[in-house]
Amino acid sequence: MSPLSKAQLCHQAEQLVDFINKSPTPFHAIDVCRNWLRGANFTELKEKQSWCGAIKPNGRYFFTRNGSSIVAFAVGGKFRPGNGTSIVAAHSDSPCLKLKPVSRKSGAGFLQVGVQLYGGGLWHTWFDRDLSVAGRVMVNDGAGGYTSRLVQIEEPIMRIPSLAIHMDRSANEAFKFNKEVHLTPILATIDKALNGADKDDAKKLPHHPVLLERIAKQLGVSVGDISDFELCLYDTQKATIGGLLNELVYAARLDNLNSSYCAIEGLINSLSGEHALEDDSHVRLVALFDNEEVGSTSAYGANSALLESSLRRIQASCDGASMASFEEAVANSYMISSDVTHAVHPNYGEKHEENHRPELQKGPAIKSNANQRYATTSVTSTILKDIAQRNGIPLQEFVVRNDCPCGSTIGPMLSAQLGLRTIDIGNPLLAMHSIREVCGADDVGLMVKLFEHFFAEFAALDAKINVD
């Protein structure tokens, strides 16, 4: 029997859909998380400022870095320096197309937009979709400074049309395309866009004037106020609940907004009781990193000092901290690295190892790999299985076939950096890295509930684990 009612499961799936529709880019996703946390009485901190005296037992806090990563944490009422941190880590980014610094292109009577490939997308799925742009724009504030603004153009303004079958009879056997040449979106027809404007003036700008004007209009500024931007293309088709029995979620960016949503929601839900933190001796922490899809090596990716500096500052900001508090805390901590995993495909069942075939609607899957592509160990899986079993949350197992390559996550990276006990888990997904992915609707609520119980119960359970 599920630990959640049908209505509760449905609510969590609908919440995920709403989150995805509000989050066409990592910048938007983190902004949504920031607003949720503020609504749950979290206090915003700044990395540039001192935290000394700001962090208290029973307190709730968060900070962002680059507007694309966020760390949120709640301090147990019985927390003391050297005590552990219960961590859920995920990533906020997804494969996409990003505008080049000079995106202005044209061909065959069309204005086109030059794009870069971000991550390992299933790029053929981007053809013939109604696309638009969203992201972050740096705007002159009129006082000699600059401010960061989020922008999202909701109507479809771009498209990457396929070549007609009549001109490539082999397309259904082997659809091949050049990523630089054929994956270039069209923006408008030249005659309509220019409409008597000076073509030479247009060529002086790095982007088409009509695009800059549309962005400026959306922000309520002039084109001259725009200093620079980071814009992603996204599919304007909304995420939705689907399937004959409303048991599936059809959406873009489920990898890994699925985990990002579940992590933040699980943390907030774990604090819903009036005295939720009173007897907790740990810190409950969620970290959402950017740039996982391109290796995590950035100032705001998992292969940075972001998590380490967060843990160090939390320890150092509390009364009674010693020189060894951080090292003691790491040894007492545990991290769930949450990233979606591959569900068994009904048309390609042979791609899965026969005894490790996660299915949609049957709960999160523990991910294991003997070559350390995932960080799961017998110790870390025992801990999470205990929490799941006591709360009626089903878990599955995933191991890749020996004759198939295995992806990785931020789990092994962070575990190795910090010496942190870690488990890799994720909700099963079909069509991973497609512009439209599929997950189980019930799995969303099950993952949220698992995180909620993990935050509430890990500290007490860890006291009973005897492993050096």
Image (cartoon, rainbow, N blue to C red):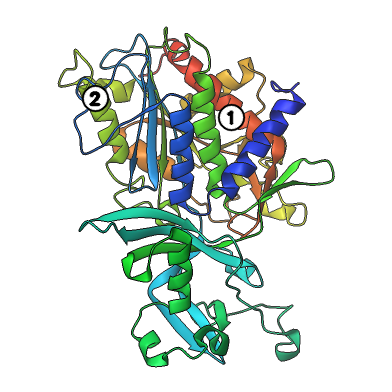
Is 282 placed above or below 445 here?
A: above
Q: Nearer the viewer, mark 2 or mark 1?
A: 1
Taking the view exactly as shown, the residue that stands out farthest to the right is 244
* Residue 384 circle label: none
| Residue beneath disc 1 | 448
Question: Within 10 angstroms of label 2, few (less than 14), some, or many (20 or more) residues?
Answer: many
Taking the image as shown, residue 438 lies to the left or right of residue 262, namely: right
- Tell me which residue sits at (52%, 42%) in the image: 339
Looking at the rendering, which quadrant does residue 315 occupy?
top left
Residue 55 location in percent, x, y? 28, 21
Residue 167 location in percent, x, y? 71, 90
Taking the image as shown, residue 125 lies to the left or right of residue 284, namely: right
Question: Within 10 angstroms of label 1, few (less than 14), some, or many (20 or more) residues?
Answer: many
- Tell me which residue sits at (48%, 46%) in the image: 29
- Amino acid at the residue labelled 2: Phe
Residue 165 location in percent, x, y? 74, 84
- Amino acid at the residue labelled 1: Val
Tell me if label 2 and label 1 are in contact, CB under 8 Å: no
User: Upstream in the sequence, badge 2 or badge 1?
Assistant: 2
* Residue 196 appears in the rendering: yes
Q: Disc 2 on helix, strand or loop?
A: helix
Identify which residue, 373 or 34, lies in the foreground: 34
Taking the view exactly as shown, the residue that stands out farthest to the left is 323
* Residue 367 appears in the rendering: no
| Residue beneath disc 2 | 326
Identify which residue, 33 or 370, lies in the foreground: 33
- Tell me which residue sits at (29%, 21%) in the image: 329
Is 104 placed above or below 60 here?
A: below
Identify which residue, 358 or 97, lies in the foreground: 97
